C-alpha cells in the first residue's frame, strides 16, 4: 500500500495542471460541502500566479502547516493549509516564503483523477527513476470484494498494484504550460501483481485500461527487478523495448547488436546494404514487443466489417515476407507499410480498447526507430511521414 496522507511539516509539491482537472471534476462535491468563504478564497484559482506560473514550470512547492480531515463528508478528502516555499531549486520563481493558501485533495485510494499533490521526495525520485527504467508499478483503486450486486461503501475500497512499461511520454499541456516538464506516461500493463516475489514472467492484460498516468504516480517495479536478477545480460540491453517473456525467447543476449540502431549500423555498409540492414533491425524490434501478437497475422476474412472499412489491410507477416523477398529497396517503403498497418488498427478500433492501446505501442516503436535512424542514418528517413 502507498502512503498518501500528509502530516504537518511535510514538504510537498503540487501540479497546477492536475489541480485544474481535479477542481473541475470535484466542483459539485466541494460546493456541496459549503466550505467557509475564507477557505474558498484562499484556494488558488485560474487567475493565480501559482496556477499560471508554477515554480519550475511544472510544480509549486510548499510545507503543510495544517491538515483538516473531511473524509466523513467525502471519502479521502482533506484540506491542506500550505505555506509556499522555494524548495525546487534556487532559481525557481514560485511562491515567496510565507505565502499561505488552502489546497483540497483526495487520497489516491478514493480519487478519480491523477494526484495533484505529492511529496517532494516522491516527485524527485520519480523523475530519476524514469530515466533509469521504463518498467514501473502503479497502484490503482479497486472496488471492494462482495456478493454480486451488493453495493459496497466507498470507504471499503482497496488498492491493487499493476506492473507495466512506459512506452511513450506525452507532453501534457504545451499550450498553457510551454515551460513545463510534465509529461504524462502512456503505459502498457502486464498483470496484477499478487505476489511480487514469484512474479517473474508477465503477460499482457486488457483488464486494466487506464493507460495514462502521471510520472509521480509510478513506483519502482519489484517484478522487473527480480527479472533483471534472473537475466542480468538481458537487463543491460537498452534495446529493444520489448515484453520480457518475448525477449527471453529471442535469445537477444547472444546477439544484442542485431537490433541496435546506433553508429555501428553504418560501418562498412553501402547505401543499399544500409537500407536492408535498417529494415531487418527495425523489423526485429517490431516483432518483439507487446503489440506483436495483434499485428502478426492477417485479420480473419470472417471479420467483414474490417474489410469493408479498411482499404489497404496488411500485417507484420506480410511485411516480413516482402522484406525477405527484397521488395523494399528503400527503408521509406517499409516504414510506410508499417505505418499503414498501425493506422488501420487505430482507425478500426475504438480508443481505450486494448487493440487501440497496442496500436499506440507499435506506433511508438516505429517512431523511436525513426528518431534513432535520423541520428545515425539520416538519409534513410528524410522523406518519411511521421
Image: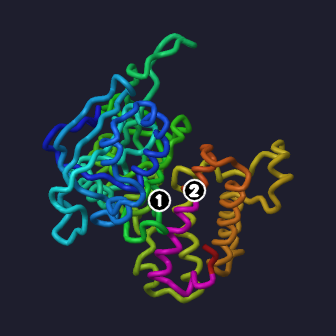
Q: In this rendered view, identify the residue nearer to me: 33 or 196.
A: 33
Q: Position of residue 118 (x, y in %)?
A: 28, 47
The vertical placement of 114 against 98, above or below, is above
Whether residue 4 can be seen here: yes
Q: Which residue is mark 1?
A: 168
Q: Position of residue 289 (x, y in %)?
A: 51, 54
Find the magenta span and give its range. 363-383
Q: Residue at x 43, y 22 (%)?
A: 154
What is the secondary structure assignment of the residue under circle 2?
A: helix
Give left or right: position of 148 versus 299: left
Q: Which residue is mark 2?
A: 360
What is the secondary structure assignment of the residue under circle 1?
A: strand
Whether the magenta-drawn stretch holds residue 367 is answered as: yes
* Colour scheme: rainbow
The vertical placement of 258 against 275, above or below, is above
Q: Quadrant of the N terminus?
A: top left
Contact between labelled residues 1 and 2, with CB atoms less than 8 Å apart: yes
Whether residue 217 can be seen here: no
The vertical placement of 323 against 62, above or below, is below
Q: Residue at x 45, y 73 (%)?
A: 261
Q: Position of residue 41 (x, y in %)?
A: 34, 47
Q: Quadrant of the C terminus?
A: bottom right
Q: Main secondary structure of the magenta part?
A: helix
Amino acid at each position: 500500500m502507498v502512503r498518501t496522507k500528509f502530516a504537518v511539516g511535510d514538504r510537498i509539491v503540487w501540479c497546477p495542471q492536475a489541480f485544474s482537472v481535479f477542481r473541475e471534476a470535484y466542483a459539485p462535491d466541494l460546493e456541496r460541502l459549503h466550505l467557509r468563504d475564507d477557505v474558498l478564497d484562499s484556494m488558488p484559482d485560474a487567475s493565480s500566479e501559482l496556477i499560471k506560473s508554477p515554480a519550475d514550470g511544472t510544480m509549486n512547492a510548499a510545507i503543510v502547516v495544517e491538515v483538516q480531515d473531511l473524509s466523513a463528508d467525502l471519502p479521502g478528502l482533506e484540506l491542506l493549509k500550505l505555506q509556499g516555499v522555494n524548495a525546487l531549486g534556487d532559481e525557481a520563481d514560485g511562491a515567496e516564503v510565507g505565502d499561505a493558501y488552502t489546497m483540497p485533495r483526495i487520497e489516491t485510494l478514493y480519487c478519480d483523477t491523477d494526484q495533484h499533490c505529492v511529496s517532494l521526495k516522491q516527485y524527485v525520485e520519480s523523475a530519476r527513476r524514469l530515466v533509469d527504467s521504463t518498467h514501473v508499478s502503479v497502484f490503482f483503486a479497486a472496488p471492494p470484494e462482495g456478493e454480486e450486486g451488493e453495493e459496497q461503501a466507498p470507504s471499503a475500497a482497496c488498492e491493487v498494484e499493476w506492473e507495466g512499461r512506459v512506452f511513450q511520454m506525452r507532453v501534457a499541456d504545451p499550450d498553457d504550460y510551454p515551460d513545463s516538464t510534465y509529461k504524462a506516461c502512456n503505459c502498457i500493463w502486464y498483470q496484477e501483481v499478487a505476489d511480487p516475489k514469484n512474479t517473474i514472467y508477465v503477460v499482457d492484460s486488457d483488464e486494466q485500461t487506464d493507460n495514462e498516468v502521471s510520472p509521480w504516480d509510478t513506483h519502482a517495479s519489484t517484478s522487473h527487478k527480480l527479472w533483471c536478477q534472473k537475466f542480468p545480460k538481458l537487463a543491460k540491453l537498452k534495446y529493444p523495448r520489448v515484453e520480457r517473456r518475448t525477449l527471453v525467447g529471442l535469445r537477444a543476449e547472444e546477439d544484442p547488436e542485431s537490433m541496435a540502431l546506433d553508429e555501428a549500423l553504418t560501418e562498412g555498409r553501402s547505401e543499399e546494404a544500409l537500407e536492408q540492414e535498417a529494415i531487418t533491425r527495425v523489423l526485429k524490434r517490431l516483432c518483439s514487443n507487446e503489440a506483436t501478437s495483434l499485428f502478426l497475422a492477417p485479420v480473419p476474412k470472417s471479420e467483414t466489417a474490417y474489410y469493408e472499412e479498411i482499404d489497404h489491410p496488411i500485417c507484420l507477416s506480410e511485411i516480413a515476407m516482402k522484406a525477405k523477398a527484397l521488395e523494399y529497396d528503400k527503408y521509406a517503403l517499409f516504414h510506410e507499410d508499417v505505418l499503414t498497418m498501425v493506422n488501420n488498427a487505430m482507425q478500426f478500433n475504438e480508443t481505450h480498447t486494448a487493440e487501440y492501446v497496442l496500436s499506440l505501442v507499435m506506433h511508438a516503436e516505429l517512431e523511436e526507430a525513426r528518431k534513432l535512424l535520423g541520428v545515425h542514418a539520416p538519409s534513410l528517413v528524410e522523406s518519411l511521414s511521421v
